[in-house]
Image (cartoon, helix red, strand yellow):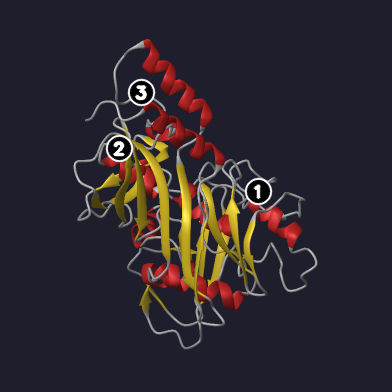
Amino acid sequence: MSRPAEDIDLLEDELLEEDGPETAALPHEEHEHWRIVADKGQSPIRIDKFLMDHLGDTSRNRIQKAAEAGCIRVDGRPVKSNYKVKPLEVVTLVLERPKRDWEIVPEDIPLDITYEDDQLMVINKPAGLVVHPGCGNYSGTLVNALAWHLRDNPDFDPNDPDVGLVHRIDKDTSGLLVIAKTPEAKTHLCHQFFVKTTRRQYNALVWGSFAEDEGRIEGNIGRDPKDRLRMACFPPESEVGKPAVTHYRVLERFGHVTLVECRLETGRTHQIRVHMRHIGHPLFNDERYGGDQILRGDTSASYRAFIHNCFALCPRQALHARTLGFVHPVTGEEMFFTSPLPQDMTALIEKWRGRGVKGTE
């Protein structure tokens, strides 16, 4: 069963905002955000496993915390995460704030379309464009642009969660995204992302020089307990966050910064940004993860001016989703797309090339 994208956001951002004792009970006012009636033939199954099967991209740990907070109900009664769902029982998710109800309105926003057929689209998203409405961005998003582009397609409803975005990239990350026009295409493509058969490579300019030409980063990614607007990396063996693996390869060295290619095994929130910071190489000009400071090099006025000029050339984290590969959901054809680096990252890299390799780590 699918559910609206805003419900996914609420489960992630509202349900488990804090881990402290203040989440032990809900306020007096409650709002239902999700409901499902178990099938007549439903075999007894733990409710955390039941919800994992129905809610999609969330973790059992988050669901268990939701149950502890009294947010998971069966026939109106709060239950623990080990409760076993039985046939025809009504399972609901309740939260303290009202469900956000908004309609995605078509907006005439230009799209850079790399590929399109009757099943899917591949979009080259510019930096600065929010992908989906939410968190104060209820218009001017990629989804609003898609609604306009496909406004004459009677089979595409931008408010239907069974079509549309298959995955996301951050607002200030540029590059390739695949969009599903039909429920069948979305199911097929989502499965490919789930079983990790898609091919996704990013180019990033990061602070520092690497001792090796390639490497592997493994570490769970979850909400940073010290800053809820950031994600953090936790040990793989811990139960905190979701497992994440990033492979990197050095493409070009500039002394104090390095151009790398990152290949994703998983697709967690801010994965490359968090993993690179974790190993001591924050993305260049990544404000949220500390890359907007001078982290390598000398303290001369000329070097400081050079870096600030670089920040001005590319006023966002230097990250681009360069390649995307998947199997077409209908034809079975292997499809592979490449997006050239955008102008701001190209100018940034050329500026470093022009400076020459000065200094090493």
- Residue 141 - label: 1
What residue is shown at x 26% (from left), y 51% (from top)? 219
Q: The residue tagged with tag 2: helix, strand or loop?
A: loop
Looking at the rendered structure, the secondary structure element under dot 3 is: loop
Q: Position of residue 159 (x, y in %)?
A: 68, 62
Horizontal side, residue 273 vs residue 213: left or right: right
Q: From this view, report whether residue 157 is shown above or below residue 318.
A: below
Q: Which numbered mark, 3 or 1, is in the foreground of this view?
A: 3
**Earlier sequence position, callout 3 versus callout 1:** 1
Task: Identify the residue under disc 3.
Answer: 294
Q: Quadrant of the C terminus?
A: top left
Question: Which residue is painted at 54% across and 58% down in the image?
Answer: 177
- Badge 2 crowding class, 10 Å Cα cut-off, few under 14, some 14 to 19, many 20 or more, is many
Q: Is residue 195 visible?
A: yes
Q: Visible in this render: residue 95?
A: no
Compute the Cα span from label 3 to label 2.
Answer: 12 Å
Name the residue rendered at 28%, 34% in the picture. Answer: 208
Residue under label 2: 281
Question: In the image, what residue type sits under mark 3?
Answer: Ile
The residue type indicated by label 2 comes to His
* First of labels 3, 2 by sequence position: 2
